[in-house]
Amino acid sequence: MSTTTPGGTTQTQAQPVRYAALDGLRGLASLAVLNMHVFGAFPFFYGAARTWGEKALKWWPFTLLSDGRQAVILFFCLSGFVLSLAWERENRYWVFLRRRFWRLYIPFSAAVLLALAVNRFHVPPSAGISAWGSQFWRVPLSWGQTVNTLLLVDPFRYNQVNPVFWSLTFEARLSLLFPVLFWVARRASAYSRGTWFLGAVLAAYVLDLLFPTKHLNNWADTLLYAIAFTVGIWLAGHRAQLQHLSRGWSRACLIGGLFAVGWQWDWIPGNWVIDARTSACLSALLGSILLLIWGMSGRDMGLLTSPPVRFLGRISYSLYLVHFPIAFSLLYLLWGKMPTVLLLTLMYGCVVLGAYVFWRSVERPATGRSRQIRGAPSSEAITPEAANQREGG
């Protein structure tokens, strides 16, 4: 038997709390990442010259459907939120890490094997697709690079495996640091919390100036994503109050969140104190906060709680992990052999089907195994972990 609470959550006896709207946000964010990669392969959207298709994707609201970089910030906020619910139930570090291993790493390792198989048997077409879309899988991986990929350690050539894997590196780092982030967000004083936020932003800015390398070697990004994690943890601690947000404030959060997440900052000159990339990250963080507040209010949830969007939310981690090898295998194999519209339809259909199969065969069993891991009863247990929610990536 299940009931719906005033805050828009679903309750059952075995699974008391599940935020359906946050499932929907995760599903739409995964769709944005998929769109960014698919659109990026076609010269119409990303060619040598700036086409009107590319220009259109730079304008709001089209950015909401195609800017995967902003969506990743939302993913990290959602991960902090969901993981804090699990930590409240069982705040034992070793139990927490074992659950994360099954929930995060087992599906990831299976996705690595799929990507390595694709890397071995597919080569990009010599002409036709965009320069960005043709850079993948050109060089076979060595055994050392394969091991580095599986261990999520630098350096590994994620563009020759799966370009979404970079975010899993940060997810793993932040999972190891989660008790510290939880203390900052929920136990530290307001002054200490503010000092942490300002210090992390400043340190990230200084590191970015001193070591302007690719993001996997840049610990500045780790600090920025740690802020997103911490924000999600803090919001989870105030979920009871946020469920009673008025309709007016809820709609204001929705509108403001959509603008902040989707707004582009490419117009900022590179020599400014805060560049376009940092501005986009901070804007996405603000938008993620507002969207999570709206999602917890339980108001005007029609789109997010619709069956298609909730389905995407349920399989979102699998969709995130396997969409690239499936879509680009078809692209490289069938480019120039069928009309573009038919190819796009086939790519999207196979990606959703493949993600569902991966979810059923890999992610769901791994999630079930993670739930079987138990520690001693915790006196601070409040809310059980939301089932089938993507805790990362």
Image (spheres, grey):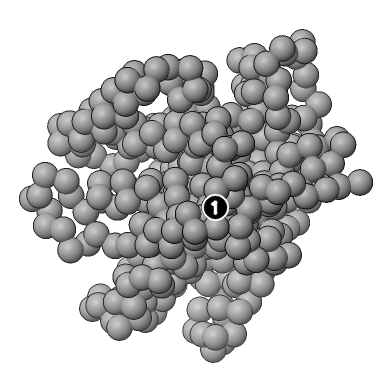
Q: What x and y, as percent, mark residue 360?
A: 78, 51
Q: What x and y, as percent, mark residue 71?
A: 45, 54
Q: Could you say whether the residue bearing mark 1 is in a helix, strand or loop?
A: loop
Q: What x and y, as percent, mark residue 41?
A: 42, 70
User: Disc count in the image?
Assistant: 1
Q: Is residue 33 above or below residue 15?
A: below
Q: Amino acid at mark 1?
A: Ser
Residue 44 falls in which quadrant of the image? bottom left
Specify the farthest residue to the left: 271
Residue 323 falls in which quadrant of the image? bottom right
> Residue 138: in sight, yes or no?
no
Q: Residue at x 61, y 15 (%)?
A: 93
Mark 1 Cα shell of 10 Å, populated few (<14), some (14-19), many (≥20): few
Residue 67 falls in which quadrant of the image? bottom left
Q: Residue at x 28, y 81 (%)?
A: 51
Task: Please indicate whether residue 87 sits to the left or right of residue 73 in the image.
Answer: right
Specify the farthest residue to the bottom: 339
Q: Residue at x 32, y 72 (%)?
A: 59
134 vs 17, nearest the viewer = 17
Label 1 sits on residue: 246
Specify the farthest residue to the right: 1
Task: Please indicate whether residue 24 sits to the left or right of residue 231 in the image.
Answer: right
Q: Is residue 278 above or below residue 351?
A: above
